[in-house]
Image (cartoon, rainbow, N blue to C red):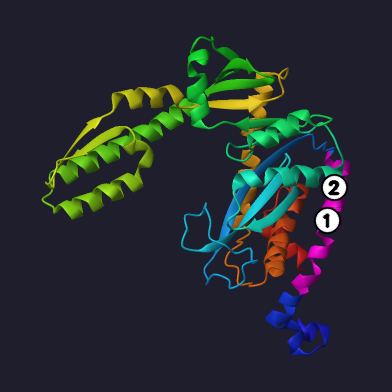
Amino acid sequence: MADLLGADAALCDIHTLYRCHDRLLEHKRAVFDHLTDRWRDLFNVSFDVLLYDLTSTYFECDPPQSDDAKRRFGHSRDRRPDCVQVVIALVVTPEGLPLAYEVLAGNTADNTTLRDFLARIEDQYGRARRIWAMDRGIPTEAVLTEMRESDPPVHYLVGTPKGRLSRFEKALLAQSWQEARPGVDVKLLPQGGELYVYAQSRDRVAKERAIRRRKLKRLWARLKQLSLMTLTREALLMKLGAARQKAPSAWRLVAVELVEKKATFRYRLRRDKLRQARRREGRYLLRTNLTETDPAKLWHFYLQLVAVEEAFKNLKGDLAIRPIFHQLDRRIEAHIFILYLPKALHPCNPGSSPSSLIACTSR
């Protein structure tokens, strides 16, 4: 590059290029405003349905000295709790267009992020009757109440924790299944201005049942193997702990009882837990304030969360977000901003990969 520009080699020094990152973030909002205008013109995108999710990316380095740094220990979706990380919150459209994102501290709790993003989207794109689809664990009851009571109301569709399914299980068992579309049946339960949609996908039932059987079979074989070994009590406890860590969902279906003061154990199948697991396989309890919307459409909205997962997959795979060597927060954010640009351009060039668009924009 220095030869092409007829400049000193210091122009291409890696730290010189890194300092260019400092100029990028001030243009972030303008870039996203321009992109949304182009998406409206090119694809007639309405941004009525928004998908929201979070991920994290880790750093293989020492923790920062400053208490204000965003690199923090937290819940690692990459299974690297030994590393500091940052959390990335992303809003995309069902078409996979990244409408907004934010880099947060690595110890940020999922359920503290939604309120700020609702305000950010409203400030940048104006008030509108939008539908937010998100996974369980992101919204709090207080935020959902604010969404229902806003003017105009902000609609939402959210997965619910398993505990809430237990609360409504009796009422849902009394309901009859309705076919929402081929292969998907639903039960509807209105509750205080909201609608609970209990959805069953036959494909998901078959898939999750096969996964559960495979894991349970492996765990059962491992327990049988351990029961025949001659081990000290401490070694047995460690091996049982390893087996539990490897198959936590299958472990809940098995009762393991240690013989007091001996290095032996008994195990049996918990048939009540197995029956409960079978009833819930491939079934999801969705919660929404779209009380008059076709259940098939609600199920379709929820399935579109895979668009967010695909964006995260591109970020960590094809776009290779790691390793990140930056130490300053602003350069970490600029690094992630650069990687989101090809993701934003990808729908305009569906025949190319996001990484190939980086190569194109660098020429």
Eyeballing the image, is 179 above or below 92?
A: above
Tell me, yes or no, if residue 202 can be seen here: no
Q: Give the number of marks.
A: 2
Eyeballing the image, is 331 above or below 120?
A: below
What's drawn in magenta, residue-wise? 20-43
* Secondary structure type for disc 2: helix
Residue at numbered disc 1: 29
Residue type at mark 1? Arg
Residue drawn at (63%, 73%) of the image: 327
Q: Nearer the viewer, residue 343 or 63?
A: 63
Q: How crowded is mark 1: few (under 14 residues within 10 Å), some or many (20 or more)?
A: few
Residue type at mark 2? Gln
Question: Is the N terminus in the top left, top right, bottom left or bottom right quadrant?
Answer: bottom right
Residue drawn at (72%, 59%) of the image: 357
Q: For the residues labelled 2 and 1, say whether their Cβ atoms are less than 8 Å apart.
A: yes
* Secondary structure type for disc 1: helix
Residue drawn at (52%, 13%) of the image: 171
Q: Position of residue 337 (x, y in %)?
A: 73, 60
Residue drawn at (67%, 35%) of the image: 142
